[in-house]
């Protein structure tokens, strides 16, 4: 297993992994967003655009020449100007192919992103995990030591 930054020529493959991620979330709950017909292509374009951006990084997991996972992160000023500056990492997306889950791929991807964040002077990072994704919540709490800070909720207007 190799964890490394994505290559420009691989971004379409990352777009396909993103589509698997979104499909996984839709299978968990119909409250999760529905991907646009060209969502994978748009996601790939976003990754392609960010390859040379020093504040954005995508790492991929390669196994026997095939991409089996990725993680996308960025460095931001997390809070509005009414608060003290808080430079933080945002772990935007992470996905590991179903047949590779539980093998350490996710942990290795997150570690690569944590190392990248640290090189940029970031002391912590934040992420979202779907409330219905019990496996994901367990990973973040038990394996990565993540803790709840805010709970994002949804209510219907009707």
Image (cartoon, grey):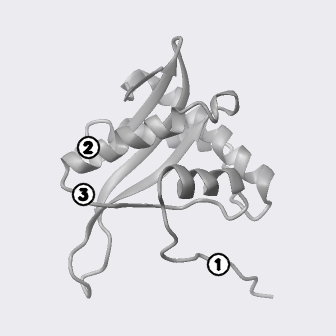
Cα–Cα span, label 1 and label 3? 27 Å
115 vs 84, nearest the viewer:
115
What is the crowding at mark 1: few (fewer than 14 residues within 10 Å), some, or many (at least 20)? few
Element under label 3? loop
Q: Position of residue 32 (x, y in %)?
A: 71, 60
**Outermost residue toward the front in this view:** 142
- Residue at screen point 67% across, 38% down: 20
Q: Earlier in the sequence, mark 1 or mark 3?
A: 3
* Mark identifier at residue 153: 1
115 to 28, vertically: above or below: above
Element under label 2? loop
Tell me if I can see residue 90 in this picture.
yes
Q: Earlier in the sequence, mark 2 or mark 3?
A: 2
Element under label 1? loop
* Mark identifier at residue 122: 3
14 to 143, vertically: above or below: above
Label 2 sits on residue: 53
Foreground disc of the pair 2, 3:
3
Image quadrant containing the C terminus: bottom right
Q: Position of residue 71 (x, y in %)?
A: 46, 41
* Residue 5 left/right relative to 15: left
Cα–Cα span, label 2 and label 3? 16 Å
95 vs 15, nearest the viewer:
95
Q: Position of residue 65 (x, y in %)?
A: 51, 12
83 to 145, vertically: above or below: below
Numbered marks: total: 3
What is the crowding at mark 3: few (fewer than 14 residues within 10 Å), some, or many (at least 20)? some
Q: Position of residue 54 (x, y in %)?
A: 22, 44
**Outermost residue toward the top in this view:** 64
């Amino acid at each position: 297993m190799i964890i490394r930054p994505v290559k420009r020529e691989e971004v379409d493959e990352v777009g396909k992994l993103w589509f698997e991620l979104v499909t996984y979330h839709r299978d968990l709950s119909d409250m999760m967003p529905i991907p646009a017909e060209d969502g994978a292509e748009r996601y790939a374009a976003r990754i392609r655009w960010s390859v040379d951006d020093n504040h954005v990084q995508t790492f991929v997991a390669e196994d026997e020449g095939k991409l089996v996972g990725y993680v996308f992160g960025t460095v931001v000023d997390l809070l509005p100007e009414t608060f003290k500056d808080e430079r933080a990492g945002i772990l935007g997306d992470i996905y590991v192919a179903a047949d590779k889950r539980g093998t350490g791929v996710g942990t290795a991807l997150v570690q690569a992103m944590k190392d990248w964040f640290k090189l940029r002077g970031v002391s912590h990072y934040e992420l979202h995990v779907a409330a219905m994704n019990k496996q994901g919540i367990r990973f973040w709490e038990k394996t990565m030591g993540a803790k709840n800070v805010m709970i994002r909720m949804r209510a219907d207007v009707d």
